[in-house]
Image (spheres, rainbow, N blue to C red):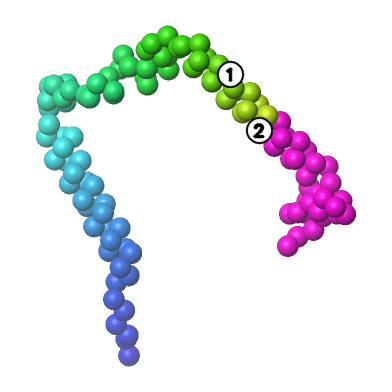
Amino acid sequence: MSRYRPTKPILRYATHFALFITIFYIIFYVTISEETWSNISLPEYLKPGDSLWKGKATKPLTPQQIKEAEKWAERAESVKAAFMHAYHGYEKYAAPWDELRPISNGRGNP
């Protein structure tokens, strides 16, 4: 006696999604000519000459902004140094285990 098993919904959803993407591709990328794509204008903040694309600031920084940037760079370095100190301690005392117990200088798994 055969038992009826409905199709798994995840497979059905995946198939529908793949079909939708294929149709979307055919409609928007195959049927639209390159002239149409070249006439589409980007918003000002996404144009290639903007600082997001070149990685450069559009205006010179003020002395206050420079001090703030230096302060953040210093903070980032101190965080990196603290992480490296903690990680080297873990490597030295508790490397194959999950935890380092700082008071007893022991190690263990939870």
Q: In this view, does 72 lie to the left or right of 23?
A: right
Q: In this view, does 77 lie to the left or right of 108?
A: left
Residue at 66%, 33% (x, y): give it.
79
Circle 1 residues within 10 Å: few <14, some 14–19, many ≥20 = few
Q: Is residue 81 left or right of residue 38?
A: right
- Mark 1 and mark 2 lie on one chain; the one further toward the N terminus is 1
Residue at 32%, 63% (x, y): give it.
11
Q: In this view, does 59 lie above or below 107?
A: above
Residue 4 locus on image (x, y percent): 29, 82
Residue bearing the label numbered 2: 79
Would you identify the image quadrant in which residue 73 lies? top right
* 80 and 15: which is toward the camera: 80
Q: Residue 70 carries which label?
A: 1
> Which part of the image, by quadrant, shows the C terminus?
bottom right
Q: What element carries label 1?
A: helix
Amino acid type at image mark 2 = Val
Highlighted range, magenta: 81-110
Amino acid type at image mark 1 = Glu
